[in-house]
Image: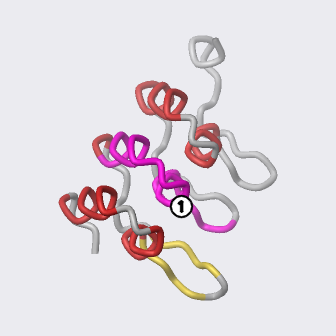
Amino acid sequence: MLINAGANLDLKDNEGFTALLWAAYKDNTEAVKMLIIAGANLDLKDNKGFTALLLAVLGDNTEAVRMLINAGANVNAIAKINNVDYTVLDLAKEIGNKTIINMLVSAGAK
């Protein structure tokens, strides 16, 4: 409804989360799909520096990761955790999901 009414898809809340970031964070794959189709910015970061792809990887959400990669999300985004820089691929390796790791490598993640 809100998308059809022209809502600002990239509006951020106090934590810097957009609708896409929340959808990725909450493993809401259907919402991720709808927001991608509607044109949400794939690479906006929250206040801690996380993109939707980073959040989907952390949530071990293979389908959301696939959709975000296919839509053109930055596979080399970096987030800082405890003053250490982590790439999307670093986080995928920490999670240990081989499917996600392979998708990222195939998409050019370093």
User: Which segment is the magenta one?
Assistant: 48-69
Mark 1: which amino acid? Leu
Q: Position of residue 13 (x, y in %)?
A: 77, 46
Position of residue 70 in the picture relative to residue 91 (left or right): left
Quadrant of the drawing holding the N terminus? top right
Label 1, on which residue? Answer: 58
Q: Position of residue 52 (x, y in %)?
A: 52, 51
Residue 74 against residue 89 in the figure, above or below: above
Quadrant of the drawing holding the C terminus? bottom left
> Which secondary structure class fits the magenta region best?
helix
Outermost residue to the left = 106
- Tag 1, which secondary structure? helix
Q: Position of residue 40 (x, y in %)?
A: 50, 36
Q: How is the image coloured?
A: secondary structure
Q: Residues within 10 Å of mark 1 (few under 14, many from 20)?
A: some
Residue displayed at 29% across by 56% down: 99
Position of residue 72 in the picture relative to residue 40 (left or right): left
Verify whether residue 83 appears in magenta.
no
57 or 11, which is in the foreground?
57
**Quadrant assignment, res 4:** top right
